[in-house]
């Protein structure tokens, strides 16, 4: 059985027009690369202890980057690539542009909805409700609505996918490059040159190191904080005053998907694979250099999704993808790929399912451990890992076990040909 709802088309589906003379091309590396990013998301999102994490598996505190900060933009980059290739397949089948446009909108809306539903789970406040000693279920549900975060990772993916898909549907290559430049330079100007409202006329460049005083934070509060009207604050609960996947900072993320779309154009070219790999390596290296130079005046920052971060990460993504393509599709070294292909074919199930599971075991389900009520996750971590490993290795071992657990689930679905496509 195959469930066909998909926002993330299978990488192997290259259009005949983009294939070399030897026949229809199958680039297994694209599924492998996507699987690497999804497994990486689970690894960094689900440690045994947030207090004991190896530095490469943590996000940069603010400016700068770590390998963990590459995971999300890598995913958006591969979304851009596979979207271009998938839509070309549809055009080759004879689908009209209106049907394609409706599909883009539907997919983007569904991804956003999935993220919103994950954020709200379990749809009632399971802890204390401020000001109410013994809240009823209805009161708990009402309190949850008042603090239901609107934005998030899946929501950003949905919006960025939809806008990038619509902006690239009927535009030329030159127009797309112009749109990307407009997004990135426009965001730079808005974030640094314009004065931030409520900050005494201070321009954004002077406030970039203070998360709650940036133009992006002000926009997040303007759009998502409804507490002044008695409708609650819908920003990220850990920050309250800004959102790492906020409204304004989602615009440059559209640029990340569009850069992936350009990479998809190149990958789908009627050229020898070695030539396409050389192009990806060269342009990727150039992107990294430009991003690092832009960092001097507009710091690389994941939470703000700065323009320098977009270009830098796209450059690393191109080089990383080219490396995977060289190993998997050029040298045909594929014995190690099954694990990541399984993850790459069902990214929606992996992300949504693991997110709901994490909410359950990290917060909702409790167990008694040494006379105390603690989250189920903490009980598993203490019993199976921290009891014989030092804290940082125990935390990593739990994260690896979480990834392997979800691989087992996805492998069963893979063997039964159950693939959720949004």
Image: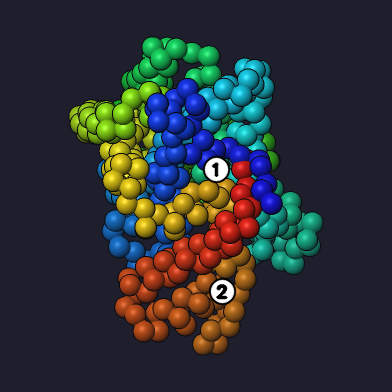
The residue under label 2 is: 376
Residue occupying image coordinates x 53% and y 14%: 170
- Earlier in the chain: of badge 2 and badge 1, it is 1
The residue under label 1 is: 154
Residue occupying image coordinates x 55% and y 87%: 371
Q: Position of residue 139 (x, y in %)?
A: 76, 56
Relative height, residue 381 to residue 101 (above, below): below
Residue occupying image coordinates x 51% and y 44%: 153
**As drawn, which residue projects farthest toward the bottom?**
370
Q: Position of residue 411 (x, y in %)?
A: 54, 61
**Circle 1 residues within 10 Å: few <14, some 14–19, many ≥20:** many
Q: 190 and 33: which one is in front?
A: 33
Q: 120 and 140: which one is in front?
A: 120
In whole angstroms, how far apart are the C-alphas of marks 2 and 1?
25 Å
Secondary structure type for disc 2: helix
**Circle 2 residues within 10 Å: few <14, some 14–19, many ≥20:** some
Q: Position of residue 152 (x, y in %)?
A: 53, 43
Q: Is residue 163 visible?
A: no
Q: 33 and 43: which one is in front?
A: 33
Q: 254 and 122: which one is in front?
A: 254
Relative height, residue 359 to residue 96 (above, below): below
Q: Quadrant of the C terminus?
A: top right
In the image: residue 25, left or right of residue 132 = left
Secondary structure type for disc 1: helix
In the image: residue 77, left or right of residue 416 = left
Residue occupying image coordinates x 62% and y 17%: 97
Q: Is residue 122 visible?
A: yes
């Amino acid at each position: 059985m195959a469930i066909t709802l998909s926002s993330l088309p299978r990488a192997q589906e290259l259009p005949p027009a983009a294939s070399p003379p030897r026949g229809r091309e199958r680039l297994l590396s694209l599924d492998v690369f996507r699987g690497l990013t999804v497994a990486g998301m689970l690894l960094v999102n689900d440690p045994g202890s947030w207090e004991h994490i190896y530095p490469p598996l943590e996000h940069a505190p603010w400016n700068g980057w770590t390998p963990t900060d590459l995971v999300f933009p890598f995913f958006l980059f591969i979304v851009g690539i596979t979207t271009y290739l998938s839509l070309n397949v549809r055009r080759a089948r004879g689908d009209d542009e209106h049907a394609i446009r409706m599909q883009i909108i539907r997919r983007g809306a569904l991804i956003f909805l999935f993220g919103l539903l994950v954020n709200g789970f379990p749809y009632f406040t399971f802890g204390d409700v401020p000001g109410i000693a013994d809240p009823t279920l209805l009161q708990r549900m009402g309190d949850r609505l008042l603090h239901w975060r609107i934005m998030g990772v899946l929501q950003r993916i949905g919006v960025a996918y939809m806008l990038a898909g619509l902006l690239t549907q009927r535009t030329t290559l030159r127009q797309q490059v112009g749109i990307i430049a407009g997004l990135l330079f426009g965001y730079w100007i808005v974030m640094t040159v314009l004065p931030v409202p409520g900050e005494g006329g201070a321009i954004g460049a002077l406030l970039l190191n203070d998360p709650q005083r940036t133009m992006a934070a002000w926009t997040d509060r303007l759009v998502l904080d409804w507490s002044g009207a008695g409708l609650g604050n819908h920003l990220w609960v850990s920050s309250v005053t800004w959102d790492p996947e906020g409204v304004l900072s989602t615009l440059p993320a559209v640029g990340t998907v569009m850069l992936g779309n350009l990479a998809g154009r190149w990958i789908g070219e009627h050229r020898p694979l070695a030539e396409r790999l050389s192009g990806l390596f060269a342009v990727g290296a150039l992107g990294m250099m430009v991003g690092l130079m832009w960092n001097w005046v507009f710091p690389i920052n994941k939470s703000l999704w700065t323009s320098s971060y977009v270009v830098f990460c796209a450059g690393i993504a191109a080089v990383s993808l080219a490396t995977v393509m060289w190993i998997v599709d050029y040298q045909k070294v594929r014995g190690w790929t099954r694990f990541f292909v399984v993850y790459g074919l069902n990214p929606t199930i992996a992300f949504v399912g693991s997110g709901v599971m994490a909410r359950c075991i990290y917060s909702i389900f409790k167990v008694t451990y040494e006379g105390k009520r603690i989250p189920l996750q903490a009980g598993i971590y203490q019993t199976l890992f921290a009891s014989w490993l030092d804290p940082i290795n125990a935390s990593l071992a739990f994260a690896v076990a979480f990834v392997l657990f979800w691989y087992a689930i996805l492998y069963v679905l893979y063997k039964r040909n159950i693939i959720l496509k949004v």
